[in-house]
Every structure is written in structure tokens, then in C-alpha cells.
Image: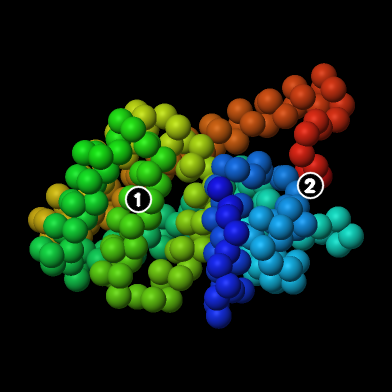
Amino acid sequence: MIRKLPTTRNLRQKVFESLKNFIISGEVSPGAKIDEDALAGKLGVSKTPIREALSKLAHEGIVKTVPNRGSFKVELTKEDLTQIMLIREALEGLCIRLAAANINNRVIEKLKALLDDFETNYLEKEIYYYTQTNLEFYDLIYKTAKSPWLIRIIQSTRDLTQMLRLILLKDPERVRYSLKAHRDLIEAFEKRDVGLAERIRKDMLRTGYQSYMKMLEEREVDLSKTVSSKGVFNGEKRLG
């Protein structure tokens, strides 16, 4: 949900963050056109900071801007996803190795507390809160890795796959599987087993990749059926 922003000195950054979170969320369909007028009205700002934010998001690969047509939420292809996940696996493997070498018991207890809090307070009630728990979990690991440039690159690719991850988290069983895998990762950290921690994280990424690919394949089939039966898209304007 996107809301009106209070007046602030950092208005442009707030607009950028709000717009980014809104587009990454499931509220905007892949390929859908971004309505600048509607967003400006909801945020209570002019279209200038909206356009500036969209330009930055285009640079990050989250939207695509087409001259004389506007900006559209990026629609990842299977080829896009394969490249992104290969990059993520290599970079996050390195990140986990660095974090495992630097981690201490205080950080490990914080990681456990994040998962405990979600399981106790949200698992059966607000499953989408796991997205925030997951982000906080890895932000803590990223800080422990102590490699700002590496983390900056990882986060740019994470934003792209986050758009698909939100859809997968509708399934409680997927969340339970993810929780178990993250408990295993913490156990590897406790053992200071760098190689095991790296393997666990890469296995998680590969499992996610397989689920994302299946989702994209199903979407392609559904889209093909829609085009074949109607010849046009209904509803939102799309890129294509």
C-alpha cells in the first residue's frame, strides 16, 4: 500500500523508496504500466520526483522506460532469471564465507531471535511478514561480511528476485521449508563451518531458482492461452 508522504528534507529519497517498495510488491503486475499521475496524487508530490525515482529504478532494472509510452514494471524472462541467479549464487556464496569467518555469538543469537519472533507471532497469522524477517536476517549477515561493495551488488539483484519471491510466499509450506533451511544455516555458523554454510545458502538459492522458473513457465502458458483466446490483454496496459 502506497501512502501520502509527510513533508521532509529527504523527500526525493522517500519517494524513491516508497515507489521501489510499491513496484517490487505484488500490487503491480509484471509488465504493467506505472501511472505517474496516480502515484503523484497518492504520495502528495509533483510528478518531478516520481519521474526522477522511475529513472533510478530503470537504472536498477526494476522498471523499463519506453519513449512516448512511459515506464513499466520489468517482466523477467527465464533467460533473465538464469543470469540473475547465477550471479547471486556466486556473490552470496562469497558473502556467506566472509560472514562465517567474522560471525560471533551475539550475531548468531540475533539471527535466531528473528526466526523465533516470526514463528511465534506471525507464522499462522501474517505470513507475508516473513519477507521482512528474511530481509532483516540477510541484512545482518551482510553487515557481518564487512564488504560494502559486495553487498551493494547483491542487494540490486535481490530486489529483482524479490518480485517473484512475494508470490511464492503465499504457500505456508514454502515458508516452513525456508525457515528450516535458515535454521540449518545458523547451525553451520555456530560450528564455524564456512564450507557448510556456503553450501546451504547455495542450495536455498537453487531451490528458489527452480520454483521461480516453474512460475515463469506457468505464466507463459497462461499468457499464451489468453492471447490465443482473446487476442488482446484486458485490464492493465502492458509493455509489449
Question: Residue 139 occupies which quadrant of the picture?
Answer: bottom left
Residue at 75% across, 66% down = 47
Residue at 29% across, 63% down = 140
Residue 50, given in percent of the width and then of the height, sits at 70, 66
Q: Amino acid at mark 2?
A: Leu
What residue would you read off at disc 2? 239
Instruction: Estimate how packed mark 1 is, as few (under 14), some (14 to 19) or many (20 or more) residues with alpha carbons within 10 Å.
Output: some
Q: On the rendered structure, is 21 left or right of 232?
A: left
Residue 170, given in percent of the width and then of the height, sits at 45, 32
Q: Amino acid at mark 1?
A: Asn
**Residue occupying the far top of the picture:** 229
**Residue occupying the far bottom of the picture:** 9
Q: Secondary structure at mark 1?
A: helix
Q: Earlier in the sequence, mark 2 or mark 1?
A: 1
56 or 3: which is nearer to us? 3
Q: Secondary structure at mark 2?
A: loop
What residue would you read off at disc 1? 134
Instruction: Estimate how packed mark 2 is, as few (under 14), some (14 to 19) or many (20 or more) residues with alpha carbons within 10 Å.
Output: some
Question: Residue 56 occupies which quadrant of the picture?
Answer: bottom right
Reply above or below: 236 against 98.
above
Residue 98, given in percent of the width and then of the height, sits at 27, 68
Residue at 80% across, 42% down = 237
Question: Residue 65 occupies which quadrant of the picture?
Answer: bottom right
Q: On the rendered structure, is 74 left or right of 111?
A: right
Residue 145, given in percent of the width and then of the height, sits at 29, 70
Q: On the rendered structure, is 190 left or right of 181?
A: left
Count numbered badges in the picture: 2
Quadrant of the drawing holding the C terminus: top right
Residue at 60% across, 66% down = 15
235 or 158: which is nearer to us? 235
